[in-house]
Structures are given as structure tokens and as C-alpha cells.
Image (cartoon, helix red, strand yellow):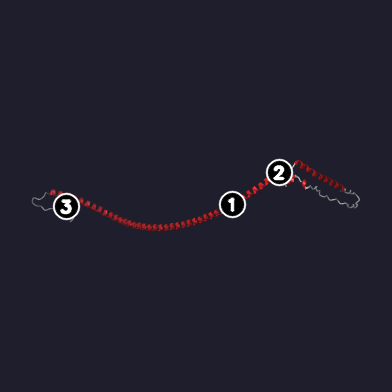
């Protein structure tokens, strides 16, 4: 049952013996009506605010639901992205491990080949060095043998030269140098005289050429005389007893 302020003001009571004071009752009813009117106004305002608040709450609930859905979607998307990223990372890690393993195997193979090649080269170099050392040792032994032969030949030659020098020295002591020089001079004089005589004879037997005529050409007589050919001068042979001491050096 709703009571309005107007009904409170117009409310009437039946009269009775020893009843209430009418003025007080009317004053109280007026005050009560005023307060009741205020309460109704406040109630209306509160209802309006409540409706507005309910609308705002409804909006907030809608926003909350939207945010919840968005968060849920973001959470699901994040979880999916995390799952995909995890799977991609695992796949990438596996591929990286496989590539790294392949590179390691290739590097090991190359290193093994390089080591084997280096060992072969070093072995070949060592073999070549050993061959060279053996060859040099053989050459050194040959040089030692040649040195010994040369030393022996030098010693023999030196001893022979010393013996020959000693013989020449002994012969020089026994020969008179002045006498040998005089003998050489005596042997050279007849040879020089014979050379001079042969040259004079050749000049005498040679006729001068006939003079030429300027105008009349006459046949010239042939020179029937033949020039004597010069014979080589032979030095007088000396006896073996007249040999010079210089012949001993030949």
C-alpha cells in the first residue's frame, strides 16, 4: 500500500472523547508528509542512480566479458604461439645439431685427409733426405778415396821432383859452366859462316830484270837460267861427347 504526502495531509480521524489535539496531529501529519515527500524524491533519485549504475555495471560486465574473451583468445593465441615457437625452436635446434654434426664430420674427414697427406709428404721428404744423405755419404767416400789417391800422387811427384832436383844439383856440381859456354860458342861459329856464304852465292846467281823499251815492242828472250833453290842450312852435328849440360834438363 502506497501512501502519498497528499493522503497524509488529507487524512481525517473520527472524533472521540478525550481525543488528541487536532493542531498537533495536523502539524505532525504536515511534517510527516514533507519528510515522506523528501524520502520519495530521494528514492526516485536513488532509483535513477541505481538504473544508471546498473546500466554502467551492465556495460562494465560486457566490457569484462569482452576483455575476458580477448584475454582468453590472447591466452590461447599466446599458448599456441608459444607451442609453435617451442616446436620451431626444437626443429631449428635439431637442424642446427644435424648441420653441426655434418660440419664436424666433414672437418674431421678433411683434417684426416690433410694429416694423411702431410704424413705422406713428410715420409717422402724423409726418404728423399735419406737418399740425398746416402748419396752425399757415397760422394764423400769417393772424395776421400780421390783425396788419398791425389795425396799419394802428390807425394810420388814430390819425391820424383826432389830426386830429379838432387840429380841436377849433383850434375851442376860436376860441370864447369864456363867451359860449357865456350863449347856452345865454338859450335855456333861454323854455322853462321856457312849461312853467310850461301846468301852471297844466291845474290850473285840472280840476274837483274831486262829494261823495257818505250816504242818498239820486241819479244824478250826467256831467262833460261833457273834460280837455285836455297837449301836449309844444316848445323854441324856435334858428337855425344860435346853435349851441353842444358840437355840434361830435357
Compare residues 59 and 174 and report the one nearer the observer: 174
Q: Residues within 10 Å of mark 3 (few under 14, many from 20)?
A: some
Q: Residues within 10 Å of mark 1 (few under 14, many from 20)?
A: few
Q: Left or right: where does residue 227 sit relative to residue 60?
A: right
Q: Which residue is mark 1?
A: 141
Q: Left or right: where does residue 213 sit relative to residue 5?
A: right
Q: Secondary structure at mark 3?
A: helix
Q: Which residue is mark 2?
A: 170
Residue at image point 77% right, 46% down: 241
- Between the C-alphas of marks 2 and 1, the distance is 43 Å
Q: Nearer the viewer, mark 2 or mark 1?
A: 2
Q: Left or right: where does residue 243 sit relative to residue 220?
A: left
Residue at image point 66% right, 47% down: 159
Tell whether label 1 touches label 3 (CB within 8 Å).
no
Question: Can you give x and y, in whole percent of width and height, for residue 46 in the image?
Answer: 24, 52
Residue at image point 80% right, 43% down: 186
Compare residues 207 and 191 and report the one nearer the observer: 191
Q: Earlier in the sequence, mark 2 or mark 1?
A: 1
Q: Residue furthest top?
A: 178
Where 68 falls versus 168 (above or below)? below
Q: Which residue is mark 3?
A: 8
Q: Nearer the viewer, mark 3 or mark 2?
A: 2
Q: Left or right: where does residue 33 sit relative to residue 234?
A: left
Amino acid at each position: 500500500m502506497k501512501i502519498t504526502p497528499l493522503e497524509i495531509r488529507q487524512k481525517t480521524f473520527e472524533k472521540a472523547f478525550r481525543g488528541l489535539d487536532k493542531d498537533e496531529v495536523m502539524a505532525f501529519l504536515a511534517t510527516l508528509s514533507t519528510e515522506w515527500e523528501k524520502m520519495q524524491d530521494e528514492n526516485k533519485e536513488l532509483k535513477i542512480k541505481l538504473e544508471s549504475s546498473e546500466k554502467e555495471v551492465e556495460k562494465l560486465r560486457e566490457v569484462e566479458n569482452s576483455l575476458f574473451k580477448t584475454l582468453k583468445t590472447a591466452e590461447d593465441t599466446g599458448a599456441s604461439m608459444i607451442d609453435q615457437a617451442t616446436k620451431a625452436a626444437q626443429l631449428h635446434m635439431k637442424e642446427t645439431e644435424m648441420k653441426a654434426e655434418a660440419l664436424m664430420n666433414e672437418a674431421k674427414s678433411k683434417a684426416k685427409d690433410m694429416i694423411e697427406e702431410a704424413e705422406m709428404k713428410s715420409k717422402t721428404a724423409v726418404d728423399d733426405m735419406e737418399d740425398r744423405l746416402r748419396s752425399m755419404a757415397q760422394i764423400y767416400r769417393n772424395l776421400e778415396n780421390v783425396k788419398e789417391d791425389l795425396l799419394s800422387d802428390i807425394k810420388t811427384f814430390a819425391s820424383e821432383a826432389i830426386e830429379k832436383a838432387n840429380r841436377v844439383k849433383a850434375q851442376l856440381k860436376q860441370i864447369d859452366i864456363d867451359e860449357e859456354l865456350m863449347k856452345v860458342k865454338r859450335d855456333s861459329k861454323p854455322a853462321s859462316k856457312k849461312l853467310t856464304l850461301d846468301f852471297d852465292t844466291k845474290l850473285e846467281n840472280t840476274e837483274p830484270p831486262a829494261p823495257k823499251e818505250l816504242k818498239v815492242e820486241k819479244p824478250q828472250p826467256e831467262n833460261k837460267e833457273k834460280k837455285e833453290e836455297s837449301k836449309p842450312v844444316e848445323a854441324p852435328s856435334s858428337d855425344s861427347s860435346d853435349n851441353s849440360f842444358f840437355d840434361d834438363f830435357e
